[in-house]
Image: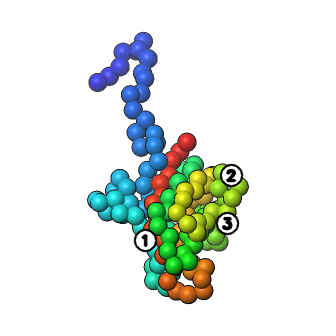
Amino acid sequence: MAELPNSFHTHQSWGRTRSPKNILSPHRAGIDANGTGKTLTFGGTATVTCTTENQRFLHVHASAVADGGKLTVTGLMYAAGSSEMTLRTVHDGAAELTATGTLLIDLSGIDRVKFTVTDTNGGDAGTCTFFAACSTF
């Protein structure tokens, strides 16, 4: 419906920018319709890369970390080529989790993020189940 020339338009919805949105899959949460978190296992599926173009913050929640697993988040920027960059949380901490917890990372200028799990015990059994979402404010 067209607006009258002297009317003032007000938006009724903020769309997909209002709350953090899942970047692991098209589902509302996790990687499937049940909301299952993404599980990475060192020695198996140890990395996953997600697109974060035009996003401001990355919210990462580790729901389970076992067998010496450590989840590390690094950034990639198209303008910088393919080199990975170390990311820091908004509180200037390392962008890594070795236990259940949550990270908030400022993504200014980052086009993709890479999640990597390693085994801090020196073996090949470290695992981490996590959720990741992005927001524009």
Q: Nearer the viewer, mark 3 or mark 1?
A: 1
Q: Amino acid at mark 3?
A: Thr
Q: Secondary structure at mark 3?
A: strand
Alpha carbon distance from label 3 to label 2: 14 Å
| Mark 2 closeness class: few <14, some 14–19, many ≥20 residues within 10 Å | few
Please state, as top left, top right, bottom left or bottom right, where the C terminus lies in the image.
Answer: top right
Question: Is the residue under label 2 in contact with that under label 3 (CB below 8 Å)?
Answer: no
Q: Is residue 30 visible?
A: yes
Question: Is the residue under label 2 in contact with that under label 1 (CB below 8 Å)?
Answer: no
Please state, as top left, top right, bottom left or bottom right, where the N terminus lies in the image.
Answer: top left
The percent coordinates of residue 102 (x first, y second) are: 55, 56
Tell me which residue sits at (55%, 66%) in the image. 99
Q: Nearer the viewer, mark 3 or mark 2?
A: 2
Tell me which residue sits at (38%, 60%) in the image. 30
Identify which residue, 73 or 79, lies in the foreground. Answer: 73
Q: Is residue 32 left or right of residue 123?
A: left
Mark number for residue 86?
3
Please tell me in which quadrant of the rendered image residue 23 appears. Answer: bottom left
Alpha carbon distance from label 3 to label 1: 22 Å
Q: Earlier in the sequence, mark 1 or mark 2?
A: 1
Q: Amino acid at mark 1?
A: Thr
Q: Earlier in the sequence, mark 3 or mark 2?
A: 3
Q: Secondary structure at mark 1?
A: strand
For label 1, the residue is: 39
In the displayed orientation, state which residue is furthest to the bottom: 123
Q: Secondary structure at mark 2?
A: loop
Q: Is residue 26 visible?
A: no
Question: Is the residue under label 1 in contact with that under label 3 (CB below 8 Å)?
Answer: no
Alpha carbon distance from label 1 to label 2: 26 Å
